[in-house]
Structure formats: C-alpha cells, structure tokens
Image: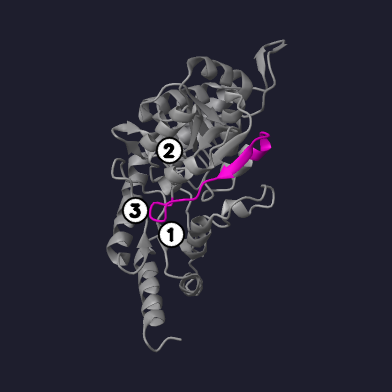
Amino acid sequence: MTYTTKIYLPDKEKFKAYIDEIYESRCLTNNGPLVQRLEKKLEAYFGVKNLLCISNGTDALQLAYRLLEVEGEVVTTPFSFVSTTSAIVVEGLMPVFADIDMDSYNIDPENIVSVITDKTCAIAPCHVFGNACKIDAIDEIAKRYNLKVIYDASHAFDVKYKGQHILNYGDMSIISFHATKLFHTIEGAAIVIKDDVLYEKAKIVRNCGIDGPDSVAMLGVNARMNEVEAAMGLCMIDEEDIIQKERKASHEFYTRKLRGYVQLQKKNEDATQSYTYFPVVFKSEDEMNRVREALLGKDIAARQYFKPSLDTLPFVEDQNVMVKSRDISSRILVVPMHSGVEPLVSEIIIATLKEMRSPEYS
C-alpha cells in the first residue's frame, strides 16, 4: 500500500554516529548536548532567535498559551489538524472559529474581525499545507485590538514570507517535526518566541517548572525533546536539500498534469512555495469519493486532510457553522508525493473525472 506520506530516513551510518555520542555521554534527555546543538542549527537555518525544541507540536501550542498567560477566547481556523483547536481547549481557553478563504484554505482576516469580542485574547491562524496566511492583515488586526498572535506553522518548514522565514512572525510560532513532515525528529516540534524574557521562562516551563537542582519556580509541563530525536533531526537537516528537491519535482508534476481537472490551492504571492503536501479539491464530494475508491483499487491511499472541520468537534461549544471549511473538507484529498506513483495517481484522477463528467454518467 502506498500512503499519503512516506517517512524519510536519513543516512544510517550518520545516525549511528550520533547514537554513539549518546552512549558515550549517557545523556538521553533533560536538554542534552544534541538537543542544544539542533536548536542552534535550526536557528541558523531559519534565521530566527529564541528557538526551543519541544516534545511535539501539540505541546508547543499549549506552551505558547501558557507562556502568554492569556485568558478568554482565541480566534482560530476550523480547517487544520485537531491539535490547533485541542491545545486551546486544554489550556482552559475557548476556541472561536473564523471561516476560511475558499481558494487559499487559510483563515480569512475579514472573518476574524467579525468574531472578535471583549473576551478575545489571541488569534491562532495556521499556514495550511505550508501556504502562508495573510500575515500583514492578521498582524494589523492584532495590533488594532491588542491581541496576541500564535502561528501554527506546522507544515511550513521551507517557507519564507517577504524574505524572512515564516517563523519570524507573530508573538510566537510553532512548527511540527512529526515523522510525516518534510523535516522530522521522529516526534517533536519547535517554538520560536519573540520576547527574550518569555524565552527564558519557556526553558523553565518546558522542564516541569524546574529552575535548579532543588528548586521549582513555577507550574510547568514536561515538553522536552530527547537526545535520540535530536540525533534524527541533526541527520535530517543535513539532507534537507535532497528531500526538498524530490518533493518539488512531485509537486510540479502534479501541478502540470492536474491543473484544469481539480481545484489547486491558491498560493500567497508574498511567500515561497511549500512542497510538504499536495491537496486537490474536487467539484463534489461524490467525485472525491469515486477518485479515492479508484486509488484504493490500486493500493494508493489518499487522505482527506483536514476532515472533520474543527467546528464539528465534540469538545467545542456550539457556534456559527463554518460553511466554507465544511465544504472544502468534504471535497479534498491529499495525494502521495513519493515512490514514483505520481503518474499513476494523475492518470487515475483524470480518467475517473472524465468518466464522471461525461454526458453518459448519471
């Protein structure tokens, strides 16, 4: 079976060399030397400061809210991975959804303004599939209403906005390093914090609130990355050009073949292109289902990222129906970008759609 994502494994000998270092140091966790080395490499790679490696993306989001000490409502997108919402709920905040733009799949800034109340404390957009949000518009809204901005940049490892890496924006930005991502540390994430004081505080909060051998300074969480994960990350970053070259080729192939048959995500013209995922949107849910079944018939599994629309989650309070998000989530598929299946996937999609759109189809 060919799945939507395929985990990239770097050079085995290089990884073993880092494991040898771990055996020599006998340090497995607690902000070890490999974690510190990876943080410095990532800061240089992204061109950011105050980057901390975290155990996973969900913990990184929760850490952001805890550090900012916000209370009340957080305006967020209904079209993202579930953690974008669940992290808000777990931290005792209320997610308030603003519907998406039908072309970019990102949160629509005009819809953000329409749901802001005197209880709103923050905005939590997601750069969906690595496609940069309308950052200038969102930041202007945040300044106008005195709100914090936490960007979920989980898919945006390779994205720059107006010449700077996308992690430079917002009060805080988080990025996922889950095994399915363009860059991974098996499990893991990072948070980038603009405020120097909050960055120092984050080091303590990440470590269960411990600030010394016999001292607990504040309520914290265990959000540490371990040394084995950092070893994987140090290998991955050395091979990032290889991974991106392969993904770019797949992305460009699909774009050439499928344009005109399906809706392709409209990209932010002020940002560089991401090659993390390739989403396609069909004219109807029926088309999507028929294509998915046809792909499964050839042992190719495409996924409906992101379904369900997050405003339908059982643990969020009822609010306005996010019509656009629910519509896109019902008609979208993300197709594999690996293993050389791109020609076959394209052929199946085109053949299925031609059949369904012919006058004889009923």
Q: In the rendered structure, which amino acid carries the disc numbered 3?
A: Lys
Of the numbered discs 2 and 1, the one sitting upstream in the chain is: 2
Quickly name the residue at label 3. 266
Predominant secondary structure in magenta? loop
Q: In the rendered structure, which amino acid carries the disc numbered 1?
A: Pro
Q: Are marks 2 and 3 in contact (CB under 8 Å)?
A: no
Q: CA distance from mark 2 to mark 3?
A: 29 Å
Whether residue 182 appears in this view of the structure is: no
Please identify, in this view, whether the residue under mark 2 or under mark 3 is nearer the observer. Answer: 3
Of the numbered discs 2 and 3, the one sitting upstream in the chain is: 2
- Is residue 92 a member of the stretch shown in magenta? yes
- Is residue 311 a member of the stretch shown in magenta? no
| Magenta segment boundaries in residue numbering | 89-105
The image shows residue 37 at horizontal and vertical percentages of 46, 23
Residue at 27% x, 62% y: name it. 256
Helix, strand or loop at mark 3 = loop
Please identify, in this view, whether the residue under mark 1 or under mark 3 is nearer the observer. Answer: 3
Quickly name the residue at label 1. 336
- Left/right placement of residue 205 relative to residue 214 reads left
Please identify, in this view, whether the residue under mark 2 or under mark 1 is nearer the observer. Answer: 1
Compared to 353, does 51 lie above or below?
above
